[in-house]
Amino acid sequence: LAPTHLSNGMAKPARKKRLPKMAQLVGPAFNASRLHNGGWTVIQRRQDGSVDFDRSWEAYKAGFGDPQGEFWLGLEKVHRITGDRGSRLAVQLQDWDGNAESLQFPVHLGGEDTAYSLQLTAPVASKLGATMVTPGGLSLPFSTRDKDHDLRGDKNCAKSLSGGWWFGTCSHSNLNGQYFRSIPRQRQQRKKGIFWKTWRGRYYPLQATTMLIQPT
Ligand code: MYR
């Protein structure tokens, strides 16, 4: 899990016609205009707010959006790709000042019987900044507004934030949040954005994200 700080002249927001920006972050082995490359599969992309990510369990299970633009591949497909063995997940984040962050870590995703639980080892979960890590690691089910599996008894994270995600305490990350071009003034709105707390913070709405997986 080695975060790398890249800054290679990607300050400008992408134009519609250009290749998805994230392709540039991971070197020549990648071409994010195609879904598969070098064994990596793009499972999520955000870049312009053109697709509504505030959707039901069934939608997150099946997938939605535009493979050439913003989309969510679907939990069932992701589960099939990771299979019984583990996988590597790559997360790429971009802010509005041309900075990028790239993370890679091993993951395993259970099937629907586990609510597509994300399995992280204890060291990986700690490095990611998870709050509830046991020696056995972290097993975190997926939640949507209509299927609440988060770790907050008093709250439905998917409802008070937005979108479907592996919500724990509602505050770690949400790459499927609402797409904002500026920080909303209202507190209730600010929480709903796309964020990764340990990079740009809880209330910084990211400019672009890509998630990729590779079976190991
Ligand atoms: C918490 O403490 O609130 C939970 C922290 C959990 C970190 C989860 C990071 C999610 C990364 C996406 C995994 C995608 C798997 C295919």
Image (cartoon, rainbow, N blue to C red):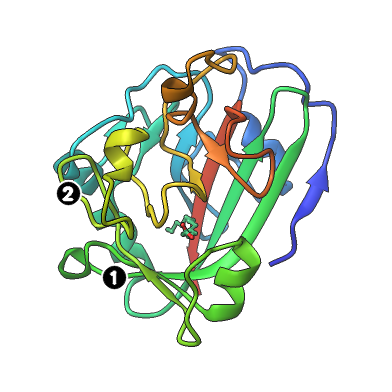
List x then y, in percent, for residue 10.
77, 26
Q: Nearer the viewer, residue 204 or 42?
A: 204
Q: Nearer the viewer, mark 2 or mark 1?
A: 2
Report the residue at 74% width, 47% height from top: 27
Q: Is residue 152 left or right of residue 191?
A: left
Q: Residue furthest front?
A: 154
**Where is residue 128 drawn, in percent x and y?**
61, 62
Query: Mark 2: is the Cβ under 8 angstroms from ligand 1?
Result: no
Left or right relative to 131: residue 55: left
Residue 99 sits above or below residue 148 on the image: above
Q: Which residue is mark 2?
A: 147
Q: Residue at x 27, y 50 (%)?
A: 154
- Element class at badge 1: loop
Q: Residue at x 30, y 41 (%)?
A: 158
Q: Please, what is the three-letter code of the amino acid marked with disc 1?
A: Gly
The quadrant of the rendering that contains the N terminus is bottom right
Residue 107 vertical placement versus 164 (above, below): below
| Among the 4 quarters of the image, the one containing residue 152 | bottom left
- Label 2 close to label 1 by CB (< 8 Å): no
Name the quadrant containing residue 125: bottom right
> Residue at horizontal 18%, vertical 37%?
56
Considering depth in this image, is 162 or 153 the residue closer to the camera?
A: 153
- Mark sitting on residue 134: none
Q: Earlier in the sequence, mark 2 or mark 1?
A: 1
Q: Secondary structure at mark 2?
A: loop
The numbered dot on residue 110 is 1
State the image coordinates of residue 5 (x, y, percent, origin top left).
Answer: 81, 47
